[in-house]
Image (cartoon, helix red, strand yellow):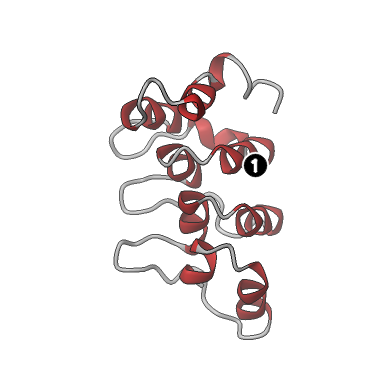
Amino acid sequence: AHYSAMHNHLETLKYLIEKQHIDLVRRTDETKLPIHYAAHYGSTQVLKYFLQMKLHVLMTDQHGNTIAHEACERNQLECVKLICKMQRNLFETKNLMQRTPLHTVKSVAPISSSTSTEISLGRFGWLEPC
C-alpha cells in the first residue's frame, strides 16, 4: 500500500483495500501511513481517493506531521490544493515542533521558488476561497 501510494497506483491501492482488506494503519519504519506518502510524493489521484473516503486523513506521523505538512514540505501544490478543498482545517494543525504546514513551506523552500511562494501566500491569498 505504501509503494502504491508513493507512485500514484490508484487501481492497485483500491484492489489492496477493497479485495485484500489490507491494514492501512500499518506504518513503515518511519511510522508514516500510505496517505502521508501520497501527499509527500504528489500522488494526487491516491490522495484524492483517501480524502474522499475519509481514510486516515487526520492521522499524524511520529513528528506530528499531517498530510498538509507532508505536501507543503515537498511543495506539492496540487496536493495542497486538494487538501485545502477537502480538509482545510489541517493547515491550522501544529506538529510536535509547533509548526503549521505553512511554516514548513517557509522553512524548507527557497524564496525564489514560485510554487513555495504560491503555497506560502496561502493564508494571505489563494487558500482563502477553499
Residue at x-position 68% and y-position 41%:
86
Question: Seen from this angle, which residue lies furthest top?
Answer: 124
Residue 40 at x, y = what percent?
45, 50
Q: Say which quarter of the image contains residue 54.
A: bottom right
Q: Say which quarter of the image contains residue 12.
A: bottom right
Residue 9 at x, y = what percent?
60, 68
Note whether 73 is above or below 107 in the view shown: below
Q: How many marks?
A: 1
Residue 126 at x, y = what percent?
63, 21
Viewer-proximal residue, 109 or 85?
109
Residue at x-position 64% and y-position 67%:
10
Residue at x-position 39% and y-position 60%:
32
Image-based side of 116 in relation to 129, left or right: left
Residue 52 at x, y = what percent?
71, 54
What is the three-letter code of the residue carrying label 1? Leu
Query: Counting other residues with Cα less than 10 Å from the Cα at mark 1, is it few (<14), some (14-19), or many (20 or more)?
Result: some
Looking at the rendering, in which quadrant would you find the C terminus?
Answer: top right
Viewer-proximal residue, 30 or 54?
30
Q: Which residue is mark 1?
A: 82
Image-based side of 106 in relation to 49, left or right: left
Image-based side of 93 in relation to 106, left or right: right
